[in-house]
Image (cartoon, rainbow, N blue to C red):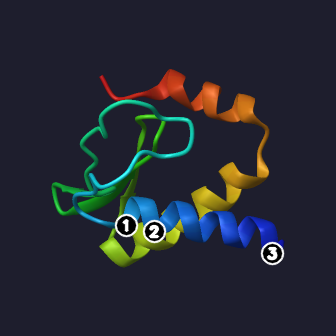
Amino acid sequence: MNPGIKENRLKHHAIYEGFQMTTFNRAGEQGTVPNRTGRFLQKNDYWYYSTREGVDIGPFDSRADAEVGVGEFIDFICASEPKISDILKQYRAA
């Protein structure tokens, strides 16, 4: 894995991993810090993770599998062109 991607992934993973994070603004954010919640959720015995783009990805059989999946997703997003994020926003949960 490219060292820059790995470093960026670790930063993003640390931001998303917690259950409730409200202590600081992210780069480019201004004003009050928005409420942030954990990225993992369980529905009907399956696990999903939520992306910044508002898309729930899954199902996974376990939280551990979802954690692997989110790591792979972060690698993908870090290596992708910015327009990929815009495309994902079209699939936000209603």
Q: Residue placed farthest to the left in the image?
A: 44
Total marks in image: 3
Q: Which residue is mark 2?
A: 14
Residues at discs 3 and 2 in contact (Cβ within 8 Å): no
Structural distance between the alpha carbons of marks 1 and 3:
21 Å
Name the residue rendered at 62%, 26% in the picture.
86
Query: Residue at 41% of width from left, 28% of height from top?
Result: 92
Q: Secondary structure at mark 1?
A: helix
- Which x, y percent locates residue 71? 55, 67
Alpha-carbon span between mark 3 and mark 2 = 17 Å
**Amino acid at circle 1:** Glu
Of the two numbered discs 1 and 3 on the same chain, state the one appearing first in sequence: 3
Which corner quadrant holds the N terminus?
bottom right
Question: Could you tell me which quadrant the C terminus lies in?
Answer: top left
Q: Is residue 67 above or below residue 77?
A: below
Residue 62 visible in rendering: no
The label on residue 17 is 1
The disc labelled 3 sits on which kind of residue? Answer: Pro
Query: Residue 62's image quarter?
Result: bottom left
Please provide percent x and percent y for residue 63.
32, 72
Asked if labels 3 and 1 touch by Cβ distance under 8 angstroms, the answer is: no
Residue at image x 37%, y 66%?
Answer: 17
Residue type beneath disc 2: Ala
Looking at the image, is mark 3 or mark 2 earlier in the sequence? 3
| Mark 1 crowd level (few <14, some 14–19, many ≥20, 10 Å Cα) | some
86 left or right of 47 in image: right
Residue drawn at point x = 43 percent, y = 60 percent: 15
Cβ–Cβ under 8 Å for marks 2 and 1: yes
Nearest the viewer among 48 and 33 is 33
- Give the residue pinned by disc 3: 3
